[in-house]
Amino acid sequence: MNYLIGSIKHCERDKIEAWAISASIFCKNAKKILICLDENIPESLLSLSKLDFELVHLPTPPNADINVAKFERHFIAREYLKSINGDDIVLLTDTLDIIFQSDPFEWYEKNKTNKILLTSEGVSHSNEFWNLGGVSRSFPNFINEITQKDVLNGGIIAGEAKYVSDLLGFIYLLASMTKPEHSEGIDQPSMNVVMLANIFKDITQITTTSESFAVNCAVAGPTEQFINWGFQKSYKYDLPKLNKDTIVNQEGHSYCIVHQYNRIKEWDIILKDKIFNLVDLKTISDLYLIHSENSEDHWKPFNFKNKYVLDLGCGRWFGVDDPTQYSPIWFGEKGATKVIGVDASTDDIEYYNEYTKDNSKYNFIQKYIESPKDIENILIAYPITAIKSDIEGFECHLLNVNPTLLKDITEMAIEYHSIDLKNAFIEKFKEWGFEVKTKAKFSFANDTVGVLFATKRKNIEKDNALVICTTRGFTLYYNDWKQNLTIDKDTYVLCDTTSGHTYSTKVALDFIQDNIINYNEDNIKKSLNFDIQPSDKHWWNVGGGRSMMWFYAHLRMLYFYKTHPEYDHYWFFDDDITFPKQQLNEFLDTHKDLDYDCMITYLFSDLNNENPSKLPVIGPGMGSYHAPEHNWLIHYPGDGDNQPPYITEKYGSYFPIVRFSNQAMKILLQEHENGYHGYSEGYIPTVLNHHGMKLYSIFNTESKVEANNDIIIHHKNWEMYWKNV
């Protein structure tokens, strides 16, 4: 298997957009991995899943010095490489300044002559004082030996995983020993010193710009330094050149990788424009770059075909000469069912009325939008199903429109005119049930203006995730799971390694490698900013002994959700749940159409609840297993539980199988970030019920699977009866 691996820290998605999009186009036959080193994953990175990226969260200490991240990424990448086959081909690249023009893995397969592949910068150390300076400051004993060697670039490393892993280890070892004041870019001098060793020199293939694998533009491109620093005289290989919109070698062959392209302004603009025009807008949520006011450019991501469109701010724009590029005309001619155009300009409305005379597809209204009521009146008068808004800040009134009037709207394209409005609409879309599909920016304006293109969520088809939660690496139950599982891209192992146990090799080989997620108590603490141990006075932890991971079992689910927010529903199974009659798929199929936000193995209500979900009421057969005569709910909430104070109804559950909707996971994460927590089996259903989430008990009081009584499930090799809990 081929792996493309990048690492990121202190950085949002927009900085790596060209790398990610070009990789999604040209590295289709590779598993694409982005390792996030931040303590918490930036929200903007989560949507990379739509570009077929797997986001791996391996946080490092929160050091603000980006130079530290430049070499600690090598150690983290080495840790990741341990989880894959040593013969797999890996390509590690920088992310901020790399763009792909063709498939580097295909090139490597055809031209591979050794175990590791590195790229030369085209000059020797003696003629490149920056890298030579790094060596002389941190590794002065090697200066004479390295002077005549080519400078090898640390931003591109490829080869067989087991050898690349060793190389990364040595680079990190040298870099981490350097003095803090000498740490700027130290990873590259470290690599060049490591490459003096015969064990690496003998297994490494060096490629240059005379070939077509990669070009490092800082030295080889037409930068300011090319002449001023003497590279014009000292460059040893063929120089790259721009051929229309592609960087090629002297033979006219496109380079697979263009590194540091952003140091040449012309190349930066041309290459990014090419990539953004190649990408299928349906596969990304951002970034779409708008270059003009022509509607075919400005409103291209708006899904208005066969829609009844409300065009708020339909006026003509300076610089648009073709009437068919005015937004209402473009919508109508390109497939809208009907267009209601609204604008404050009397002249523009008269123009449109004349232009579309006798065409029933159009209706134009001259009106200032000065309040939510102005929009509401239009929504009442016409059966609008899509809204486009460009009203110079007055879009703020859309935020306060009665949401019941938006029930038939499935698409929105909102041009915002401040960052506050952008953020307000992103939050409001969530409330309205929309998902932002594209965040567009203008190439000719600053970041305070842009366009959000959103789709009502019910129109977005997503898969379900099946997550097996284990603390023992399947040592007892894996054979049972293996008989049941159809392992695919949506099947995960979430392995708690706090105790030192991890999954076995045979499990690793069965699963998709990136879907085995190791975590421990420290990961949970950092990712979720949580360090509260369960009270030893709580009923389920009397005298102590229960770990945070056991007591707050839902935290592992939130940990998973933060890195995989794209699913409609999330099934979580403890690994000691088994299906003796191989009925897992039948179980999943039986429940797939049930419209509940929170489904738990056993879920029960207190007698005093309104109980809108009609759950079983706690009774003799569902008492506490600690003392059958006691009602389970006497003990929840207990000492140390901190659920929201406004909650009045409480629910209990038994937790080895759960399914949550995406919205339920969002609520749980939101309440967690608000500082609330509690024993999972009481806290989860209690909080979700308060927020109007629909609850469902998978088993009834007779210990039968409610949806299909013929399905048999075991827990710890016992049939799932409440009395066995």
Image (cartoon, rainbow, N blue to C red):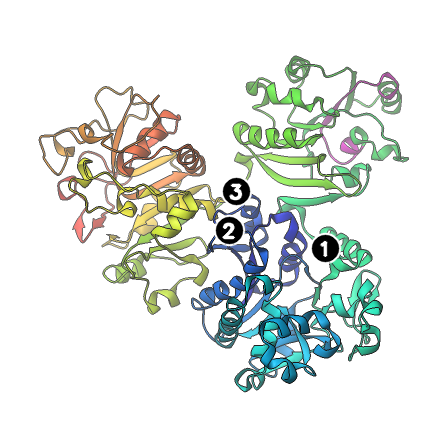
Residue in the picture at 48% in, 67% down:
78
Q: CA distance from mark 1 to mark 3?
A: 26 Å
In the depicted structure, whether residue 188 falls above or below residue 552 = below
* Mark 1 vs mark 2: in front: 2
Residue annotated with mark 1: 275
Residue 143: image location, x then y, percent: 64, 80
Q: Which badge, 2 or 3, comes first in the chain's sequence? A: 2
> For this view, does 12 lie left or right of residue 227?
left
Towards the viewer: 663 or 361: 663
In the depicted structure, whether residue 143 falls above or below residue 674 = below
**Circle 3 Cα neighbour tier, 10 Å, few/some/many (<14 / 14–19 / ≥20):** few
Q: Which badge, 1 or 3, comes first in the chain's sequence? A: 1
Q: Give the image quarter of residue 661.
A: top left
> For this view, does 371 lie left or right of residue 346?
left
Residue 201 visible: yes
Q: Which disc is residue 461 wearing? A: 3
Q: Give the image quarter of residue 392.
A: top right
Q: CA distance from mark 1 to mark 2?
A: 27 Å
**Circle 2 Cα neighbour tier, 10 Å, few/some/many (<14 / 14–19 / ≥20):** many
Amino acid on which the number 3 mark rests in the picture: Glu
In the depicted structure, whether residue 218 falls above or below residue 323 = below
Residue annotated with mark 2: 38
At mark 3, the secondary structure is loop
Residue 244: image location, x then y, percent: 84, 61
* Mark 2 vs mark 3: in front: 2
Please report the bounds of the magenta region as a residue range: 330-348
> For this view, does 705 lie left or right of residue 53?
left
At mark 1, the secondary structure is helix
Amino acid on which the number 2 mark rests in the picture: Asp
